[in-house]
Amino acid sequence: RSDSIIAESADGAQSLVAGGGNPFPGSIRTGYAQSVLGTFGDSITTSPSYSAPLSWALNVPWVEVAQDGAPTSTLLSLMQASSLTASADESVILCGINDVNANVSAAVIEANLAAIGALVHNPHYVTILPYGNHVGWTSGRETVRQAVNDWIKANTSNYTDAEAAMGDLTMPSQPVLKSAYDSGDGLHPNDAGNTALAGAIFAQGFDSEALV
């Protein structure tokens, strides 16, 4: 497979971006060989991210529609305008933390996530990562984050519990990214975190599925 992707920036320009090496050499799932992976989200999805290691694990190319700082409403608009959205056979959706930090209600975030999922083939939702060490964290925002995550778990048929894989739950009321996965701002994963997130998505969202 090619280790390149097509990425779409905020202005709609498309470009090839080099991917990385396979961190899961024993986990190639050739059953997805005829598929294209789509990753859709905010700065946690913009390359470099979990997308490259996940595409390697699945042995497929991927397309990406993502924008730094995007709330779910912006991502929805970008995806509605992008020709890449419908090109993905398997779609990973990870977005919502910017809404949380902007004090958007859980109901609005959930409605936008549902609308995003309706645009794509085979949506795989990822819960919003814990961010208790980030400067923007508050207990009120944590309540919203957890409400959205509960909605994802209750209302989507295919999801990855990112908090279970990535979170340090020593303080249940203020979960944080594990230090080994934290880029330093308490919000964005580092390279090890991106690999761990890809592994979690692969195991929870794909490895348990019948390969087609």
Image (cartoon, grey):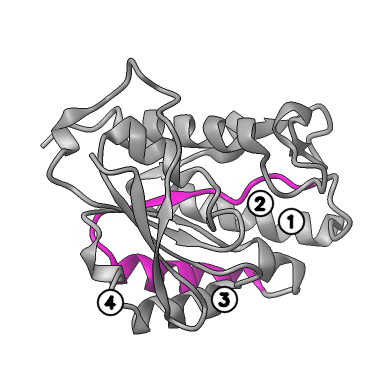
Residue type marked 3? Val
Marks 4/2 in contact by CB < 8 Å: the verdict is no
Q: Which residue is mark 1?
A: 143
The circle on residue 160 is none
Question: Which numbered mark, 4 or 3, is in the foreground of this view?
Answer: 4
Q: Which residues are magenta?
A: 105-131
Mark 2 neighbour density, 10 Å: few (under 14) some (14–19) many (20 or more): some
Tell me the SS state at disc 3: helix
Q: Residue at x 49, y 73 (%)?
A: 9
| 104 part of magenta stretch | no
Q: Quarter holding the N terminus?
A: top left
In three-dimensional space, the C-alpha distance between marks 3 and 2, rounded to whole angstroms, equals: 14 Å
Q: Which residue is mark 3?
A: 108
Marks 2/1 in contact by CB < 8 Å: the verdict is yes
Q: Quarter holding the C terminus?
A: top left
Mark 4 neighbour density, 10 Å: few (under 14) some (14–19) many (20 or more): few
Q: Which residue is mark 4?
A: 83
